[in-house]
Image (cartoon, rainbow, N blue to C red):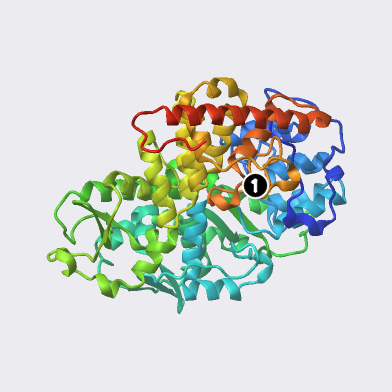
Amino acid sequence: MPRQSWTIDPDLDGIDLEPEDFKASLPLKKVPAGDIYEASRAGDVERLRYLLESGVNVNARDQWDSVSLYYACLAGHLDAARMLLESGAICSEHTFDGDRCHYAALNLKVRKLLKAFEARPPPLGPLQAAMRDTFLGCTANRLYLEQSDSQFQFPGPSSNGESNYNHFPPDVVFVVQGRPIEAHRVILSARSPFFRRKFETDWKNRTEVRLSREKLSFPALYSLIHFFYSDRLEIAVDDMEDLARICKVCKCESLQKIVEKEVDLQKHAEYKSLRDVDNSQKRFILQGLSLPEEDRLPSSLRQILQISLANSTMEMSDSLDDFADICIKVSEKIFRCHQVVLASRSEYFKARLSRMDDFFEGKDGSAGYALPCLEEHDLSMEAFEKMIEYMYTDGLKDIEPDQAEELFDVSSRYLLFPLKRAVADVLLPQLEMVPPSELCHWLIMSDMYGVVKIREYCLDVMACNFETFADTPVFRAMLLTLPPPSGDSSLRTTVPNAPGAAGSGGANNSPSDQGNLLDDLREKWLEAEAAELDKRDESALLFDKRLEMLMLVAQQEKSGNPNDDEDDTH
Protein backbone atom coordinates (compact mmCIF):
# COMPACT_ATOMS: atom_id res chain seq x y z
CA MET A 1 0.00 0.00 0.00
CA PRO A 2 1.53 3.39 -0.96
CA ARG A 3 2.35 5.63 1.93
CA GLN A 4 0.09 8.61 2.47
CA SER A 5 1.35 12.11 1.77
CA TRP A 6 2.58 14.17 4.67
CA THR A 7 -0.05 15.96 6.76
CA ILE A 8 0.27 18.86 9.16
CA ASP A 9 1.39 17.75 12.59
CA PRO A 10 -0.85 19.17 15.34
CA ASP A 11 2.29 20.49 17.03
CA LEU A 12 2.84 22.74 14.01
CA ASP A 13 -0.61 24.35 14.01
CA GLY A 14 0.80 27.60 15.32
CA ILE A 15 3.01 28.34 12.31
CA ASP A 16 0.18 29.30 9.94
CA LEU A 17 0.88 26.58 7.37
CA GLU A 18 -1.90 24.88 5.46
CA PRO A 19 -1.77 21.58 3.55
CA GLU A 20 -1.63 23.48 0.24
CA ASP A 21 1.50 25.25 1.47
CA PHE A 22 3.33 21.95 1.18
CA LYS A 23 2.84 21.91 -2.58
CA ALA A 24 6.06 22.46 -4.47
CA SER A 25 7.25 26.01 -5.15
CA LEU A 26 9.35 24.76 -8.03
CA PRO A 27 8.67 21.94 -10.52
CA LEU A 28 9.40 18.50 -9.11
CA LYS A 29 11.37 15.86 -10.93
CA LYS A 30 12.31 12.26 -10.24
CA VAL A 31 15.91 11.29 -9.57
CA PRO A 32 15.66 7.49 -9.14
CA ALA A 33 19.45 7.11 -8.79
CA GLY A 34 20.14 10.41 -7.07
CA ASP A 35 21.88 10.87 -3.74
CA ILE A 36 20.26 12.65 -0.78
CA TYR A 37 21.40 16.06 -2.04
CA GLU A 38 19.97 15.56 -5.53
CA ALA A 39 16.71 14.17 -4.15
CA SER A 40 16.35 17.18 -1.82
CA ARG A 41 17.11 19.66 -4.57
CA ALA A 42 14.62 17.96 -6.90
CA GLY A 43 11.92 17.51 -4.25
CA ASP A 44 11.74 13.77 -4.96
CA VAL A 45 10.22 12.68 -1.65
CA GLU A 46 9.93 9.02 -2.64
CA ARG A 47 13.65 8.78 -3.36
CA LEU A 48 14.35 10.80 -0.22
CA ARG A 49 12.22 8.46 1.89
CA TYR A 50 14.08 5.44 0.50
CA LEU A 51 17.49 6.97 1.28
CA LEU A 52 16.52 7.99 4.82
CA GLU A 53 15.01 4.57 5.59
CA SER A 54 18.26 3.03 4.29
CA GLY A 55 20.16 4.84 7.03
CA VAL A 56 21.77 7.71 5.10
CA ASN A 57 23.09 10.41 7.43
CA VAL A 58 20.63 13.29 7.12
CA ASN A 59 23.23 15.82 8.33
CA ALA A 60 26.11 14.75 6.08
CA ARG A 61 27.75 17.49 3.99
CA ASP A 62 28.67 17.29 0.32
CA GLN A 63 31.84 18.57 -1.34
CA TRP A 64 30.57 22.15 -1.04
CA ASP A 65 29.93 21.78 2.70
CA SER A 66 26.16 21.85 2.13
CA VAL A 67 23.60 19.58 3.79
CA SER A 68 20.52 18.14 2.13
CA LEU A 69 18.18 20.43 4.09
CA TYR A 70 19.96 23.44 2.56
CA TYR A 71 19.01 22.31 -0.94
CA ALA A 72 15.39 21.59 0.01
CA CYS A 73 15.08 25.07 1.58
CA LEU A 74 16.82 26.75 -1.34
CA ALA A 75 14.36 25.15 -3.80
CA GLY A 76 11.35 25.73 -1.53
CA HIS A 77 10.36 22.05 -1.29
CA LEU A 78 8.40 22.04 2.00
CA ASP A 79 7.50 18.35 1.73
CA ALA A 80 11.16 17.37 1.37
CA ALA A 81 12.29 19.81 4.09
CA ARG A 82 9.65 18.45 6.47
CA MET A 83 10.81 14.88 5.85
CA LEU A 84 14.45 15.82 6.50
CA LEU A 85 13.57 17.74 9.68
CA GLU A 86 11.52 14.86 11.07
CA SER A 87 14.50 12.59 10.38
CA GLY A 88 16.77 14.75 12.54
CA ALA A 89 18.16 17.41 10.20
CA ILE A 90 19.84 20.21 12.18
CA CYS A 91 18.06 23.53 11.72
CA SER A 92 19.21 25.63 14.68
CA GLU A 93 19.88 29.15 13.38
CA HIS A 94 22.93 29.43 15.64
CA THR A 95 24.76 26.64 13.78
CA PHE A 96 26.64 26.91 10.50
CA ASP A 97 24.28 24.52 8.69
CA GLY A 98 21.14 25.99 10.25
CA ASP A 99 22.23 29.55 9.48
CA ARG A 100 22.65 28.65 5.79
CA CYS A 101 19.23 26.97 5.68
CA HIS A 102 17.45 29.96 7.26
CA TYR A 103 19.27 32.41 4.98
CA ALA A 104 18.68 30.37 1.82
CA ALA A 105 14.99 29.65 2.51
CA LEU A 106 13.07 30.46 -0.66
CA ASN A 107 10.08 31.98 1.10
CA LEU A 108 8.51 32.74 4.47
CA LYS A 109 6.74 29.37 4.58
CA VAL A 110 10.07 27.54 4.62
CA ARG A 111 11.38 29.81 7.38
CA LYS A 112 8.24 29.19 9.45
CA LEU A 113 8.81 25.45 9.12
CA LEU A 114 12.45 25.79 10.21
CA LYS A 115 11.46 27.93 13.21
CA ALA A 116 8.82 25.39 14.28
CA PHE A 117 11.30 22.52 14.27
CA GLU A 118 14.04 24.61 15.88
CA ALA A 119 11.80 24.94 18.96
CA ARG A 120 11.02 21.23 19.19
CA PRO A 121 12.88 18.67 21.35
CA PRO A 122 15.71 16.88 19.53
CA PRO A 123 14.58 13.73 17.72
CA LEU A 124 16.14 10.89 19.68
CA GLY A 125 15.57 7.14 19.72
CA PRO A 126 13.83 5.65 22.80
CA LEU A 127 17.13 4.52 24.33
CA GLN A 128 18.90 7.83 23.79
CA ALA A 129 15.90 9.83 25.00
CA ALA A 130 15.61 7.74 28.17
CA MET A 131 19.31 8.01 28.98
CA ARG A 132 19.31 11.76 28.26
CA ASP A 133 16.39 12.15 30.68
CA THR A 134 18.39 10.30 33.32
CA PHE A 135 21.46 12.48 32.78
CA LEU A 136 19.38 15.65 33.07
CA GLY A 137 17.52 14.16 36.02
CA CYS A 138 20.72 14.57 38.03
CA THR A 139 20.34 17.86 39.88
CA ALA A 140 23.71 19.40 39.06
CA ASN A 141 23.42 18.56 35.37
CA ARG A 142 19.93 20.01 35.10
CA LEU A 143 20.92 23.21 36.94
CA TYR A 144 23.79 23.83 34.52
CA LEU A 145 21.42 23.33 31.59
CA GLU A 146 18.88 25.75 33.06
CA GLN A 147 21.54 28.36 33.85
CA SER A 148 22.94 28.28 30.33
CA ASP A 149 21.69 30.73 27.76
CA SER A 150 18.13 29.57 27.01
CA GLN A 151 18.37 30.33 23.30
CA PHE A 152 20.70 27.36 22.86
CA GLN A 153 18.69 24.88 24.87
CA PHE A 154 16.01 22.51 23.69
CA PRO A 155 12.89 21.83 25.73
CA GLY A 156 12.67 18.56 27.58
CA PRO A 157 11.15 15.52 25.95
CA SER A 158 7.74 16.04 27.51
CA SER A 159 5.30 17.05 24.80
CA ASN A 160 3.56 19.56 27.06
CA GLY A 161 6.80 21.36 27.85
CA GLU A 162 6.88 20.25 31.48
CA SER A 163 9.93 18.65 33.04
CA ASN A 164 9.79 14.90 32.61
CA TYR A 165 13.31 13.90 33.58
CA ASN A 166 14.03 10.55 35.20
CA HIS A 167 15.69 10.96 38.57
CA PHE A 168 18.14 8.15 39.23
CA PRO A 169 21.10 8.89 41.53
CA PRO A 170 24.58 9.05 40.00
CA ASP A 171 27.38 6.80 41.20
CA VAL A 172 30.23 9.19 40.35
CA VAL A 173 30.61 12.99 40.40
CA PHE A 174 33.31 14.92 38.52
CA VAL A 175 34.28 18.32 39.91
CA VAL A 176 35.78 20.65 37.30
CA GLN A 177 36.62 24.26 38.13
CA GLY A 178 34.51 23.89 41.26
CA ARG A 179 31.40 22.73 39.34
CA PRO A 180 30.01 19.17 39.44
CA ILE A 181 28.99 16.84 36.61
CA GLU A 182 27.02 13.81 37.81
CA ALA A 183 27.31 10.55 35.87
CA HIS A 184 27.10 6.74 35.91
CA ARG A 185 30.17 4.54 35.57
CA VAL A 186 28.70 2.02 33.15
CA ILE A 187 27.70 4.68 30.59
CA LEU A 188 31.09 6.40 30.60
CA SER A 189 32.94 3.06 30.52
CA ALA A 190 30.86 1.84 27.59
CA ARG A 191 31.63 4.97 25.55
CA SER A 192 35.28 5.65 26.38
CA PRO A 193 38.30 3.33 26.85
CA PHE A 194 39.90 6.04 28.99
CA PHE A 195 37.04 6.13 31.49
CA ARG A 196 36.84 2.35 31.49
CA ARG A 197 40.51 1.99 32.43
CA LYS A 198 40.26 4.68 35.10
CA PHE A 199 37.21 3.09 36.73
CA GLU A 200 39.00 -0.24 36.80
CA THR A 201 42.13 1.25 38.41
CA ASP A 202 42.62 4.74 39.89
CA TRP A 203 38.94 5.62 40.32
CA LYS A 204 37.66 2.15 41.19
CA ASN A 205 36.26 2.94 44.61
CA ARG A 206 35.82 6.70 44.28
CA THR A 207 32.45 8.40 44.11
CA GLU A 208 33.95 11.85 43.56
CA VAL A 209 36.76 12.72 41.15
CA ARG A 210 38.29 16.19 41.22
CA LEU A 211 39.89 17.21 37.94
CA SER A 212 42.24 20.07 38.76
CA ARG A 213 43.84 20.78 35.39
CA GLU A 214 43.42 24.53 34.82
CA LYS A 215 42.96 24.20 31.08
CA LEU A 216 40.21 21.60 31.33
CA SER A 217 37.01 23.15 29.99
CA PHE A 218 33.89 22.45 32.03
CA PRO A 219 31.47 23.17 29.13
CA ALA A 220 33.43 20.86 26.81
CA LEU A 221 33.50 17.97 29.30
CA TYR A 222 29.80 18.48 30.12
CA SER A 223 28.92 18.40 26.40
CA LEU A 224 30.93 15.21 25.89
CA ILE A 225 29.34 13.38 28.83
CA HIS A 226 25.89 14.54 27.67
CA PHE A 227 26.78 13.07 24.27
CA PHE A 228 27.71 9.76 25.90
CA TYR A 229 24.14 9.49 27.19
CA SER A 230 22.19 10.91 24.25
CA ASP A 231 24.22 10.45 21.04
CA ARG A 232 23.68 14.17 20.50
CA LEU A 233 26.40 16.78 20.84
CA GLU A 234 25.69 20.49 21.26
CA ILE A 235 28.55 22.86 22.04
CA ALA A 236 29.61 26.47 21.57
CA VAL A 237 32.08 26.97 18.72
CA ASP A 238 34.45 28.62 21.23
CA ASP A 239 34.70 25.33 23.17
CA MET A 240 35.29 23.01 20.22
CA GLU A 241 39.09 22.99 20.37
CA ASP A 242 38.88 22.03 24.06
CA LEU A 243 36.43 19.28 23.14
CA ALA A 244 38.80 17.91 20.51
CA ARG A 245 41.59 17.68 23.12
CA ILE A 246 39.28 15.92 25.60
CA CYS A 247 38.18 13.47 22.88
CA LYS A 248 41.82 12.64 22.24
CA VAL A 249 42.43 11.90 25.93
CA CYS A 250 39.21 9.85 26.20
CA LYS A 251 40.14 7.92 23.03
CA CYS A 252 36.88 8.84 21.26
CA GLU A 253 38.61 8.70 17.89
CA SER A 254 35.69 8.95 15.47
CA LEU A 255 34.19 11.91 17.35
CA GLN A 256 37.60 13.53 17.61
CA LYS A 257 38.06 13.43 13.81
CA ILE A 258 34.66 15.02 13.20
CA VAL A 259 35.23 17.77 15.76
CA GLU A 260 38.73 18.56 14.48
CA LYS A 261 37.42 18.81 10.92
CA GLU A 262 34.62 21.09 12.10
CA VAL A 263 37.12 23.31 13.97
CA ASP A 264 38.98 23.87 10.70
CA LEU A 265 35.73 24.61 8.86
CA GLN A 266 34.56 27.08 11.49
CA LYS A 267 37.75 29.12 11.09
CA HIS A 268 36.71 29.96 7.53
CA ALA A 269 32.92 29.59 7.82
CA GLU A 270 30.89 32.53 6.57
CA TYR A 271 27.71 33.03 8.61
CA LYS A 272 25.01 35.06 6.89
CA SER A 273 22.59 35.86 9.70
CA LEU A 274 25.22 35.76 12.49
CA ARG A 275 28.07 37.60 10.81
CA ASP A 276 28.24 40.10 13.69
CA VAL A 277 27.99 37.47 16.46
CA ASP A 278 31.10 36.06 18.16
CA ASN A 279 31.87 32.35 18.43
CA SER A 280 30.53 32.05 21.97
CA GLN A 281 27.06 32.57 20.49
CA LYS A 282 27.51 30.09 17.65
CA ARG A 283 26.85 26.39 18.11
CA PHE A 284 27.87 23.06 16.68
CA ILE A 285 25.30 20.25 16.84
CA LEU A 286 26.04 16.63 15.96
CA GLN A 287 23.68 13.66 15.81
CA GLY A 288 24.94 10.15 16.60
CA LEU A 289 24.20 9.00 13.04
CA SER A 290 27.31 10.91 11.96
CA LEU A 291 29.44 8.34 13.83
CA PRO A 292 30.14 4.77 12.72
CA GLU A 293 27.50 2.41 14.09
CA GLU A 294 29.94 0.72 16.45
CA ASP A 295 30.61 4.06 18.19
CA ARG A 296 26.96 4.88 18.93
CA LEU A 297 25.20 4.32 22.25
CA PRO A 298 23.23 1.14 21.33
CA SER A 299 26.35 -0.66 20.10
CA SER A 300 28.36 0.47 23.12
CA LEU A 301 25.74 -0.83 25.55
CA ARG A 302 25.40 -4.04 23.56
CA GLN A 303 29.07 -4.77 24.23
CA ILE A 304 28.57 -4.21 27.95
CA LEU A 305 25.46 -6.42 27.89
CA GLN A 306 27.31 -9.24 26.13
CA ILE A 307 30.02 -9.19 28.79
CA SER A 308 27.40 -9.17 31.55
CA LEU A 309 25.50 -12.09 30.02
CA ALA A 310 28.74 -14.07 29.72
CA ASN A 311 29.49 -13.35 33.38
CA SER A 312 25.95 -14.22 34.48
CA THR A 313 26.81 -17.90 34.48
CA MET A 314 29.86 -17.35 36.70
CA GLU A 315 30.21 -17.11 40.46
CA MET A 316 29.44 -13.66 41.83
CA SER A 317 32.53 -11.51 42.25
CA ASP A 318 33.45 -7.85 42.58
CA SER A 319 36.37 -8.36 40.20
CA LEU A 320 34.33 -8.90 37.03
CA ASP A 321 34.77 -6.34 34.27
CA ASP A 322 31.13 -5.57 33.42
CA PHE A 323 30.43 -2.80 36.01
CA ALA A 324 27.23 -4.61 37.05
CA ASP A 325 25.63 -3.26 40.23
CA ILE A 326 22.49 -5.41 40.49
CA CYS A 327 21.61 -9.08 40.04
CA ILE A 328 18.24 -10.24 38.72
CA LYS A 329 17.32 -13.83 39.48
CA VAL A 330 15.00 -15.46 36.92
CA SER A 331 14.27 -19.15 37.44
CA GLU A 332 17.67 -20.72 38.13
CA LYS A 333 19.79 -18.06 36.41
CA ILE A 334 21.18 -14.87 37.90
CA PHE A 335 21.63 -12.02 35.42
CA ARG A 336 24.20 -9.31 36.10
CA CYS A 337 22.68 -5.95 35.12
CA HIS A 338 23.06 -2.20 35.56
CA GLN A 339 20.61 -0.21 37.62
CA VAL A 340 20.82 2.98 35.56
CA VAL A 341 19.79 1.17 32.36
CA LEU A 342 16.94 -0.77 33.97
CA ALA A 343 15.57 2.30 35.78
CA SER A 344 15.88 4.55 32.73
CA ARG A 345 13.97 2.18 30.45
CA SER A 346 11.26 0.82 32.78
CA GLU A 347 9.10 2.55 35.38
CA TYR A 348 8.64 -0.87 36.99
CA PHE A 349 12.37 -1.28 37.66
CA LYS A 350 12.71 2.37 38.60
CA ALA A 351 10.15 1.81 41.37
CA ARG A 352 11.70 -1.45 42.56
CA LEU A 353 15.24 -0.14 42.58
CA SER A 354 14.18 2.91 44.56
CA ARG A 355 13.33 0.50 47.40
CA MET A 356 16.61 -1.40 47.36
CA ASP A 357 16.68 -1.54 51.18
CA ASP A 358 14.20 -4.40 50.89
CA PHE A 359 16.48 -6.42 48.63
CA PHE A 360 20.00 -6.24 50.01
CA GLU A 361 22.36 -9.22 49.82
CA GLY A 362 21.52 -12.18 51.97
CA LYS A 363 17.78 -11.95 51.47
CA ASP A 364 15.84 -14.87 50.00
CA GLY A 365 18.76 -17.21 49.92
CA SER A 366 21.12 -14.93 48.04
CA ALA A 367 23.76 -14.90 50.78
CA GLY A 368 27.29 -14.77 49.50
CA TYR A 369 26.53 -12.68 46.46
CA ALA A 370 28.53 -9.48 46.21
CA LEU A 371 25.68 -7.48 44.66
CA PRO A 372 22.09 -6.76 45.72
CA CYS A 373 19.70 -9.19 44.12
CA LEU A 374 16.08 -8.98 42.93
CA GLU A 375 14.00 -11.98 41.96
CA GLU A 376 11.48 -11.94 39.11
CA HIS A 377 8.74 -14.54 38.75
CA ASP A 378 6.40 -15.84 36.06
CA LEU A 379 8.66 -15.36 33.05
CA SER A 380 11.25 -17.48 31.31
CA MET A 381 14.98 -16.84 31.29
CA GLU A 382 14.83 -16.51 27.49
CA ALA A 383 12.14 -13.82 27.65
CA PHE A 384 14.05 -11.86 30.29
CA GLU A 385 17.21 -12.00 28.22
CA LYS A 386 15.34 -10.69 25.17
CA MET A 387 13.78 -7.94 27.27
CA ILE A 388 17.12 -6.65 28.56
CA GLU A 389 18.56 -6.94 25.04
CA TYR A 390 15.95 -4.42 23.96
CA MET A 391 16.45 -2.25 27.04
CA TYR A 392 20.19 -1.95 26.37
CA THR A 393 20.13 -1.67 22.57
CA ASP A 394 16.66 -0.51 21.39
CA GLY A 395 16.45 -3.57 19.15
CA LEU A 396 16.08 -7.33 18.91
CA LYS A 397 18.31 -9.40 16.69
CA ASP A 398 15.92 -12.33 16.33
CA ILE A 399 13.08 -14.01 18.15
CA GLU A 400 11.12 -17.20 17.69
CA PRO A 401 7.36 -16.84 17.11
CA ASP A 402 6.63 -18.82 20.27
CA GLN A 403 8.55 -16.17 22.27
CA ALA A 404 6.54 -13.25 20.89
CA GLU A 405 3.41 -13.81 22.97
CA GLU A 406 5.40 -13.91 26.21
CA LEU A 407 7.29 -10.77 25.20
CA PHE A 408 4.01 -8.94 24.53
CA ASP A 409 2.97 -9.84 28.07
CA VAL A 410 6.37 -8.86 29.48
CA SER A 411 6.24 -5.44 27.78
CA SER A 412 2.96 -4.68 29.56
CA ARG A 413 4.02 -6.05 32.96
CA TYR A 414 7.32 -4.18 32.99
CA LEU A 415 5.86 -0.96 31.51
CA LEU A 416 8.16 -1.24 28.51
CA PHE A 417 5.58 -0.59 25.82
CA PRO A 418 7.95 0.21 22.88
CA LEU A 419 9.15 -3.41 23.19
CA LYS A 420 5.89 -4.45 21.52
CA ARG A 421 6.84 -2.57 18.38
CA ALA A 422 10.34 -4.08 18.36
CA VAL A 423 8.87 -7.59 18.67
CA ALA A 424 6.36 -6.82 15.92
CA ASP A 425 9.14 -5.63 13.58
CA VAL A 426 10.99 -8.94 13.99
CA LEU A 427 7.87 -11.09 13.93
CA LEU A 428 6.14 -9.55 10.92
CA PRO A 429 8.32 -11.10 8.16
CA GLN A 430 7.77 -14.54 9.73
CA LEU A 431 3.98 -14.14 9.57
CA GLU A 432 4.13 -14.03 5.78
CA MET A 433 4.70 -17.79 5.78
CA VAL A 434 2.17 -18.92 8.41
CA PRO A 435 -1.10 -20.73 7.48
CA PRO A 436 -4.50 -18.99 7.90
CA SER A 437 -5.25 -20.85 11.13
CA GLU A 438 -2.11 -19.48 12.78
CA LEU A 439 -2.78 -15.98 11.52
CA CYS A 440 -6.11 -16.09 13.37
CA HIS A 441 -4.18 -16.74 16.58
CA TRP A 442 -1.95 -13.71 15.98
CA LEU A 443 -4.92 -11.49 15.27
CA ILE A 444 -6.44 -12.37 18.65
CA MET A 445 -3.08 -11.92 20.43
CA SER A 446 -2.33 -8.58 18.78
CA ASP A 447 -5.80 -7.27 19.60
CA MET A 448 -5.49 -8.43 23.22
CA TYR A 449 -2.09 -6.77 23.75
CA GLY A 450 -2.70 -3.73 21.55
CA VAL A 451 0.04 -4.47 19.00
CA VAL A 452 -1.26 -2.31 16.17
CA LYS A 453 1.27 -3.31 13.52
CA ILE A 454 0.50 -7.05 13.78
CA ARG A 455 -3.23 -6.42 14.13
CA GLU A 456 -3.35 -4.32 10.97
CA TYR A 457 -1.29 -6.85 9.02
CA CYS A 458 -3.58 -9.73 9.99
CA LEU A 459 -6.70 -7.73 9.09
CA ASP A 460 -5.21 -6.75 5.72
CA VAL A 461 -4.37 -10.35 4.82
CA MET A 462 -7.78 -11.61 5.91
CA ALA A 463 -9.60 -8.88 3.97
CA CYS A 464 -7.64 -9.55 0.79
CA ASN A 465 -8.10 -13.35 1.08
CA PHE A 466 -11.47 -13.46 2.78
CA GLU A 467 -12.88 -16.53 1.02
CA THR A 468 -9.73 -18.51 1.80
CA PHE A 469 -10.15 -17.73 5.48
CA ALA A 470 -13.90 -18.35 5.30
CA ASP A 471 -13.12 -21.95 4.34
CA THR A 472 -10.91 -22.35 7.42
CA PRO A 473 -12.60 -23.92 10.51
CA VAL A 474 -10.30 -21.97 12.87
CA PHE A 475 -11.38 -18.67 11.33
CA ARG A 476 -15.05 -19.58 11.63
CA ALA A 477 -14.58 -20.66 15.24
CA MET A 478 -12.76 -17.38 15.95
CA LEU A 479 -15.81 -15.42 14.78
CA LEU A 480 -17.85 -16.90 17.64
CA THR A 481 -15.38 -15.51 20.19
CA LEU A 482 -15.51 -11.92 18.92
CA PRO A 483 -18.06 -9.16 19.63
CA PRO A 484 -20.49 -8.98 16.69
CA PRO A 485 -20.10 -6.19 14.14
CA SER A 486 -22.04 -3.10 15.07
CA GLY A 487 -24.02 -3.04 11.83
CA ASP A 488 -25.47 0.32 10.88
CA SER A 489 -23.03 3.14 11.57
CA SER A 490 -25.57 4.90 13.76
CA LEU A 491 -25.58 1.89 16.10
CA ARG A 492 -21.80 1.51 16.36
CA THR A 493 -20.20 1.78 19.77
CA THR A 494 -16.69 1.84 18.35
CA VAL A 495 -15.17 3.80 15.49
CA PRO A 496 -13.50 1.58 12.89
CA ASN A 497 -10.23 2.65 11.35
CA ALA A 498 -10.66 4.70 8.19
CA PRO A 499 -9.85 2.90 4.92
CA GLY A 500 -6.11 2.93 4.37
CA ALA A 501 -5.31 4.12 7.87
CA ALA A 502 -2.46 2.40 9.67
CA GLY A 503 -4.20 2.61 13.02
CA SER A 504 -4.54 5.63 15.18
CA GLY A 505 -2.56 4.34 18.12
CA GLY A 506 1.01 3.50 18.88
CA ALA A 507 2.71 0.37 20.07
CA ASN A 508 1.26 0.67 23.53
CA ASN A 509 -2.40 0.69 22.57
CA SER A 510 -4.74 -1.10 24.89
CA PRO A 511 -7.58 -3.11 23.40
CA SER A 512 -10.06 -0.49 24.55
CA ASP A 513 -8.29 2.06 22.33
CA GLN A 514 -8.99 0.02 19.21
CA GLY A 515 -12.10 -0.60 17.15
CA ASN A 516 -14.29 -3.66 17.05
CA LEU A 517 -12.29 -6.32 15.18
CA LEU A 518 -15.13 -7.29 12.86
CA ASP A 519 -15.97 -3.65 12.18
CA ASP A 520 -12.35 -3.09 11.17
CA LEU A 521 -12.29 -6.29 9.12
CA ARG A 522 -15.38 -5.05 7.28
CA GLU A 523 -13.69 -1.71 6.51
CA LYS A 524 -10.56 -3.48 5.29
CA TRP A 525 -12.68 -5.77 3.10
CA LEU A 526 -14.56 -2.82 1.60
CA GLU A 527 -11.24 -1.18 0.85
CA ALA A 528 -9.81 -4.34 -0.71
CA GLU A 529 -12.94 -4.78 -2.83
CA ALA A 530 -12.72 -1.10 -3.84
CA ALA A 531 -16.39 -0.59 -3.04
CA GLU A 532 -17.70 2.64 -4.52
CA LEU A 533 -18.68 5.25 -1.98
CA ASP A 534 -22.38 5.21 -2.87
CA LYS A 535 -22.48 1.41 -2.58
CA ARG A 536 -20.54 1.00 0.66
CA ASP A 537 -23.61 0.52 2.84
CA GLU A 538 -24.96 -2.14 0.47
CA SER A 539 -21.60 -3.90 0.30
CA ALA A 540 -21.22 -3.72 4.10
CA LEU A 541 -24.63 -5.34 4.51
CA LEU A 542 -23.61 -8.19 2.21
CA PHE A 543 -20.41 -8.66 4.24
CA ASP A 544 -22.37 -8.78 7.50
CA LYS A 545 -24.75 -11.41 6.08
CA ARG A 546 -21.73 -13.47 4.97
CA LEU A 547 -20.39 -13.28 8.53
CA GLU A 548 -23.75 -14.42 9.89
CA MET A 549 -23.69 -17.45 7.61
CA LEU A 550 -20.15 -18.32 8.69
CA MET A 551 -21.14 -18.02 12.35
CA LEU A 552 -24.08 -20.38 11.79
CA VAL A 553 -21.72 -22.89 10.22
CA ALA A 554 -19.35 -22.46 13.16
CA GLN A 555 -22.20 -23.06 15.63
CA GLN A 556 -23.14 -26.24 13.80
CA GLU A 557 -19.52 -27.39 13.78
CA LYS A 558 -19.27 -26.64 17.48
CA SER A 559 -22.48 -28.46 18.43
CA GLY A 560 -21.50 -31.41 16.27
CA ASN A 561 -18.23 -31.85 18.15
CA PRO A 562 -18.63 -34.88 20.49
CA ASN A 563 -15.94 -33.46 22.79
CA ASP A 564 -17.95 -30.30 23.42
CA ASP A 565 -19.93 -30.50 26.69
CA GLU A 566 -22.33 -27.74 25.73
CA ASP A 567 -25.29 -28.36 23.41
CA ASP A 568 -26.35 -25.80 20.89
CA THR A 569 -29.38 -24.01 22.34
CA HIS A 570 -30.69 -22.83 18.97
Q: Is residue 161 above or below residue 28?
A: below
Residue for point 49% across, 50% down: 418
Q: Quadrant of the N terminus?
A: top right
Left or right: where 23 falls relative to 84: right
Q: Which quarter of the figure has residue 316? A: bottom left
Instruction: State the image quarter where residue 386 is shown.
Output: top left
| Residue 361: percent from left, percent from top | 19, 69
Q: Looking at the image, which is closer to me, 215 or 274?
A: 274
The percent position of residue 456, horizontal first and vertical second, equals 58, 37
Question: Is residue 431 at all visible to an observer of this figure?
Answer: no
Which residue is the site of mark 1?
A: 504
Q: Residue extending furthest bottom?
A: 178
Name the residue rendered at 74%, 28% in the picture: 539
- Residue 343 pos. (x, y %): 40, 63
> In terms of depth relative to the viewer, which is nearer, 191 or 138?
138
Label 1: state its secondary structure. loop
- Taking 113 as reference, is 426 left or right? left
Q: Dot 1, crowdedness within 10 Å: few (<14), some or many (≥20)?
A: few
Task: Out of 328 and 155, give the one closest to the viewer.
Answer: 328
The type of residue carrying mark 1 is: Ser
Q: How many discs mark residues in the rendered view?
A: 1
The answer to whether any part of residue 513 appears in the image is yes
- Measured as percent of width and height from the top left, residue 306 is found at 30, 46
| For residue 319, side relative to residue 516 (left or right) | left
Q: Residue at x 80, y 39 (%)?
A: 77
- In the depicted view, which residue is nearer to us: 532 or 401? 532
